[in-house]
Image (spheres, rainbow, N blue to C red):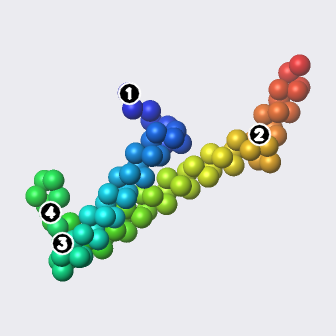
Amino acid sequence: MFNPDLNSRLNRTVFVGLGVMIVVLGFVALQHVSLMYHNWWKGLVFGPFAIIIGVLFVATMFKLGSLQRKQDSPASPEWRRAQRLKKNRR
């Protein structure tokens, strides 16, 4: 059900969605002139901290996606090494 590979498109989409939701909740708390809001478990969450964590979620997922694209591109050393191994096996 859950793919543990963080580079899969579905997992990155879910994590980006969670990051955006966290950022929005932080901004909503700041719009209500309150630095804190209650999460699902009735615990207090500091709004600016939530914004930073959400932005880090989103940035990390985009960075993982770009790293995956670099590894799959013909310009990457890993791709070239794999092509040489294929050629030598023939």
Q: CA distance from mark 4 to mark 1?
A: 30 Å
Structural crowding at the residue carrying mark 3, measured as other residues with C-alpha within 10 Å and reported as few (<14), some (14–19) or many (≥20): some
Q: Are marks 3 and 4 in contact (CB under 8 Å)?
A: yes
Return the residue found at the far bottom.
33
- Res 41 seen here: yes
Amino acid type, label 2: Trp
Q: CA distance from mark 1 to mark 3?
A: 35 Å
- For residue 16, which numbered disc appears in the image? none
- The quarter holding residue 71 reads top right
Q: CA distance from mark 2 to mark 3?
A: 48 Å
| First in residue order: circle 1 vs circle 2 | 1
Amino acid type, label 3: Met
The residue pinned by badge 3 equals: 36
Q: CA distance from mark 1 to mark 2?
A: 29 Å
Q: Are marks 1 and 2 in contact (CB under 8 Å)?
A: no
Q: Is residue 38 left or right of residue 10?
A: left
- For residue 79, which numbered disc appears in the image? 2
| First in residue order: circle 2 vs circle 3 | 3
The residue pinned by badge 1 equals: 1
The residue pinned by badge 4 equals: 38
